[in-house]
Structure formats: C-alpha cells, structure tokens
Image (cartoon, rainbow, N blue to C red):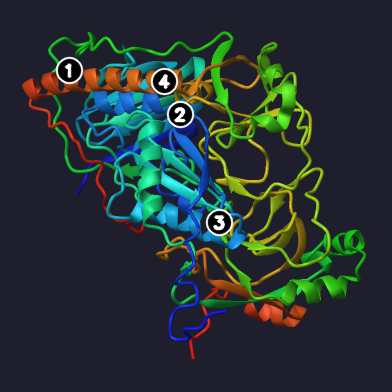
C-alpha cells in the first residue's frame, strides 16, 4: 500500500505538473504550473524530476498530512510553513514525520505556492500529464478530506538539527510584489496595429479581477487594430498579447485555448510568464520591450541556474542516501 | 494537353516550390504560414510539417508541439533547450520531404452529424439569416449541404474546424462573447464552422446543437476524427434530438 497525502484544509489547490506539452497539437491547452520556475525548483529540492506532479496552492491557506515519513519542498508565493508546530523555511528540503500536520498559511506576496513531495504523486494522467483542464473536465481542485497517493515509499533523511535548516541550497528566489516588470517581444501580427503598439509601454497596467490561468486582463492604454480583414483561426502562443473587443488588454497564459482569430500584437517571455503567474488582481505590471535573442539568452540563463541547483542537490542527496528521481513516471492514466 | 495518357498528368511539370513564411512568435514559438499561393496546398503543407516535426523520425528534442490550422502552424519549443535558429533549420529540413499535392489522409473517414437547428438549440440562427439576407431554412440548407473537410483541431477540446457554409458573407463574431456555451453546439464565425466538444465561453454564432457526444477522455484519441476526415450535417427533429442524446460520434462504416 502506497503512502497517501490527506488534505486537511484547502481553498484553491490542484495536483499539477509542467503541463500537457503534447496537448496543443490536438486542441487541448498545455496548462500546468503558472510559475514554472518555482515548480521546477520545488521538485529539484524534493529530489524529484522537474516534471513530476506537485501541488499548486493558489492564494488561500492549505494544510495536509502524510501517513509516512517524507521529504517535501515548498516554493513560490511567500507563505508561513509550519510542520508539526515548528516553522520551517520555504525554498529548502524539509522533512515531515508520518502524521505531522503541515500548514501553509498567510500568503504575503505572490499568488501561487508549490508543494513537492519526494516520490511525487500517483494521479491520473491525460497525454502524459496530470495537469487539470477545466474546459474538458479533467482533474480538478482538491477538497478537504481528499487523499492523493504517493509513488512508492520514500526515505526520510535523519534531521539532527531540529528546527534548523536541513540544507540550504541558496536558491535564486524570484521577487514578488510591487509593480512587476514584464518583458514583451514583437508579435507576428504587430503590423496590424500600425504605430499604436508602443502604447503598451506608456504606463503600467492594472491586473483586473477577470484574470485567471487562461489569461490576464489588464486595464490601461489600448493599442488599436488598424487592419480589418477577417482572421482565420490560428495557433496562438502562450504569452500572446491581444486586444479583444472591450476595454482591456489580454495576455494569454498556460490555460489558453490553443487557436484563436485575434491578431497577436506581442508575446510575453517565458520568464515573465512565471512572474505573471504570481501577480494578484489589482496589482500593477509594467510592460517593457525585449528582443527575441535577449529572451532566449534569459531562458538559457535560467536553465543554467536550474542545472547548477540540480547538481548541487543531487550531490547532497546522494550523500544522504536519497534517491534522486529523473523520471516523472509515464504510467498510463489509472482509473480513480 | 498530355499526350502520354499512361503517365501521371503532372509528371513533367515543375514541382511547385514549397514556400513558407516564418514569423517569430516569442522565444519559444515560430509561426509558419504556407505561401504556395493555393489554400489547399498551404493546408496540406502545414499539417504535414506539424507531423514531420512532432512525430517523424527526425524530431528534434525540445520541439514540444505543433498546432496546425488552416494556413499556418505554430511550432512550440522549449527555449531552455533550443533557439529559433535551430528550429528554423529543422523546419527547412522537414520541408524538403513534404509533397504538398499528396492527400493528407490516404483514406479519410466520413462522419454524419445530426443537428437540431434554431430555437433554443440555435439561438443565433435567425440573426445569421438576417445578416445573410436569407431565410433560416436557407441557412440550414446551406449548412447541411457540403461534405466538409476537417481542417484542424481547435479550442476548446479538439473542436473540428471546418470551412464555413457559403452564406455570401462572413459571419461576425459576437460583440460580447457568451460566458458559457454548452457542449455539442454547432456554430459559425467568419468563414469558419465548428462543433464544440466541451462547454466553454464562446464568441461564435450558434445555429444548432448535436445530441452526440464528441469528446471521450477515456478514448484514445479522445476525439474520433482527425484533420482530413470529413463531416456532413443533417437536420433532425426535437424527438430525434432527445433519442440520440449521449450517443457517441463515430465514423460511418466504409462500404
């Protein structure tokens, strides 16, 4: 019998991963963690494959227990992490004893917190991913009392320094809060907005309440589409900046419908999409132009940081006898 | 005039160059648009290119998915592993092996879709008719006439995207999209038509509803059709609509 995680209290939390990368070619959204960097780091710190299933906690408090000794890591939006009455650090591996209550509360900045558990979860998959898709009714939010199976039994490292950091990997932590800078590249349909595209960079936009995992709606200066031709549905990239009818700018995120008939004015970089995954409704974002080459270099720089962290973590885990997992388990979807 | 009747008709003609335009779409995507000058060729080209890049033997690790539509394919890749120049190279190499004149599917399957048009099932039928200067029955007739080719799978949930019926006008999108459109709706926008397999917000004009279930998450694939298959609609009564509710959409048996 595999160990299980039991949800004790929750607002909005889902079991997810980096997304259904093969879905868009079949008409399904890619979905997955909105802050991919934080999700990858959580898995690395829990000695998992970066693509392993983990829990994404949005905005509200979340608590759980596990019926086995486990190693966990919590990253993303800043919350108070308490394990069995003792406050523990985020962005570090943390050991949890069987039956201990783990509480995440009081999100201070940011919007989404990630909880990885060593060994990851055994959840149903669609096209290889556990990421929920609200449109087609796959997966869903965790509810109080839900149990999620963990893969195999796990090993808990001894923690002689009770209440202290188990191991500090000095992770690069993104900064959340304030006016979030968002980098935007020229989109393939920029010409359809003539000279008005520059309005994107005039002044900050306010993120409105209608924002979610499908897209963020921003109030502020609107570029104007000058062409009037009928647009055939085309694949739209994650991060697409569009001006739909109405008075708001739309930036598509990972839950976006994969085809649409609106021209794509700009595209937000993948690193800025992670930042948008942490912006709350009501907060400000300031868009700034960046060219594709710079964005590619940034993406590779983040990759290098993740690789460094992973090799550092692997060395430490090897010394402690923790098996680092490189596979995220391509098990076929199992019926619930 | 071809004097050698046994030879393929186009054998001696120069092969149309496989031309495309490639537009940057961020650091992890490229949009490739067919530029052969012929819509059918462009469509076959982008679907074959998608297949070659994601399912062929020479797929490049880091190319995640390709979204082929009517005249374009969006190629998405992991910017942490690949840059656009490398992906452009892979696209150029894949284009070498593509025959834009060969059919997309050797044996297209045919689907028959029963539709209850108008009324509560198609609340926009009357408006579409008015915009086109037709009677609602004429819109139904035009919609049910063609054997449509499924051009691509779209949002939401693998919708079969079709060239719309000939109504003389492009059908405008709703000024304010509906927050909830139920599954099975049959809709029009621009010069496109579709069936919606999953409930979602929608800005298309709704002209009818099919009682058949299109999306089956336990199935593999989870929608029964592919680009290149064909669909034909036919009108049904309320009674037939009720009787067919929940039945799965399946291809016609081949004779």
Q: In the picture shown, does residue A278 fall above or below B227?
A: above
* Mark 1 and mark 4: Cα distance apart in space: 20 Å
User: From this viewpoint, is residue A103 visible?
Assistant: no
Q: Dot 1 surroundings within 10 Å: few (below 14), some, or many (20 or more)?
A: some
Whole-percent x, y for residue B58 in the image: 28, 50
Q: Which residue is mark 4?
A: A76
**Helix or strand or loop: what does disc 3 sit on?**
helix
Q: Please, what secondary structure does the residue beneath circle 4 have?
A: strand
Q: CA distance from mark 3 to mark 4?
A: 44 Å
Q: What residue is pinned by disc 2?
A: B27
- Residue behind mark 1: A312
**Count of marks overlaid on the render:** 4
State whether discs 1 and 2 lie on one chain: no
Mark 3 — on which chain does it sit? Answer: B
Q: Write the residue at 41% across / 38% down.
A: B88
Subunit under mark 1: A
Q: Are marks 2 and 4 on the same chain?
A: no
> Are labels 3 and 1 on one chain?
no
Label 1 in the same subunit as label 4:
yes
Q: Which residue is mark 3?
A: B42
């Amino acid at each position: 019998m595999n160990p299980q995680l039991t949800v004790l209290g929750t607002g909005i939390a889902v079991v997810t991963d980096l997304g259904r990368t093969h879905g868009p070619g079949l008409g399904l959204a890619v979905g997955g963690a909105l802050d991919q960097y934080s999700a990858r780091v959580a898995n690395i710190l829990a000695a998992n494959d970066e693509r392993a299933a983990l829990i994404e906690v949005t905005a509200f408090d979340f608590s759980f227990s596990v019926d086995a000794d486990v190693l966990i890591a919590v990253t993303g939006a800043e919350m108070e992490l308490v394990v069995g009455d003792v406050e523990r650090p985020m962005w570090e591996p943390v050991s949890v004893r069987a039956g201990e209550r783990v509480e995440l509360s009081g999100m201070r900045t940011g919007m989404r917190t990630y909880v990885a558990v060593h060994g990851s979860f055994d959840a149903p998959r669609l096209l290889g991913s556990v990421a929920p898709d609200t449109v087609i009714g796959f997966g869903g939010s965790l509810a109080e009392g839900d149990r999620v199976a963990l893969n195999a039994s796990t090993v808990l490292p001894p923690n002689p320094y009770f209440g202290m950091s188990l191991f500090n990997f000095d992770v690069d932590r993104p900064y959340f809060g304030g006016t979030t800078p968002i980098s935007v590249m020229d989109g393939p349909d920029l010409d359809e907005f003539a000279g008005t595209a520059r309005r994107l960079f005039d002044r900050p936009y306010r993120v409105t309440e209608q924002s979610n995992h499908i897209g963020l709606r921003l109030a502020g200066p609107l570029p104007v589409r000058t062409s009037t031709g009928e647009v055939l549905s085309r694949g739209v990239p994650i991060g697409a900046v569009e001006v739909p009818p109405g008075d708001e700018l739309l930036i598509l995120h990972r839950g976006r419908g994969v085809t649409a008939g609106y021209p794509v004015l700009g595209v937000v970089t993948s690193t800025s999409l992670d930042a948008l995954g942490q912006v709350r409704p009501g907060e400000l974002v300031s868009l700034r132009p960046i060219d594709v080459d710079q964005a590619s270099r940034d993406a590779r720089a983040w990759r290098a940081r993740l690789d460094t962290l992973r090799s550092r973590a692997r060395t430490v885990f090897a010394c402690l006898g923790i098996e680092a997992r490189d596979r995220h388990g391509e098990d076929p979807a199992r019926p619930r | 005039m071809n004097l050698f009747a046994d030879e393929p008709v186009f054998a001696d003609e120069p092969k149309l160059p496989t031309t495309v335009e490639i537009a940057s779409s961020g650091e992890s995507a490229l949009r490739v648009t067919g530029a052969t000058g012929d819509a059918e060729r462009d469509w076959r080209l982008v679907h074959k290119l998608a297949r070659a890049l994601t399912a062929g033997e020479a797929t490049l690790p880091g190319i995640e998915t390709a979204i082929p539509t009517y005249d374009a394919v969006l190629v998405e890749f992991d910017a942490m592993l690949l840059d656009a120049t490398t992906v452009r190279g892979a696209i150029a190499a894949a284009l070498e092996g593509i025959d834009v004149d060969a059919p997309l599917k050797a044996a297209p399957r045919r689907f028959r879709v029963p539709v209850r048009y108008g009324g509560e099932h198609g609340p926009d039928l009357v408006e579409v008719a008015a915009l086109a200067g037709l009677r609602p029955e004429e819109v139904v007739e035009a919609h049910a006439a063609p054997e449509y080719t499924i051009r691509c799978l779209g949002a939401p949930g693998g919708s079969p995207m079709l060239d719309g019926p000939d109504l003389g006008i492009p059908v405008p999108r709703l000024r304010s999209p509906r927050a909830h459109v139920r599954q099975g709706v049959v809709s029009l926008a621009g010069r496109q038509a579709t069936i919606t397999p999953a409930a979602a917000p929608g800005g298309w004009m709704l002209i009818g509803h099919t009682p058949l279930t299109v999306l089956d998450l336990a199935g593999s694939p989870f929608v029964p059709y592919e680009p290149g298959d064909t669909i034909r609609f036919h009108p049904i009564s309320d009674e037939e609509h009720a009787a067919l509710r929940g039945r799965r959409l399946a291809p016609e048996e081949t004779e």
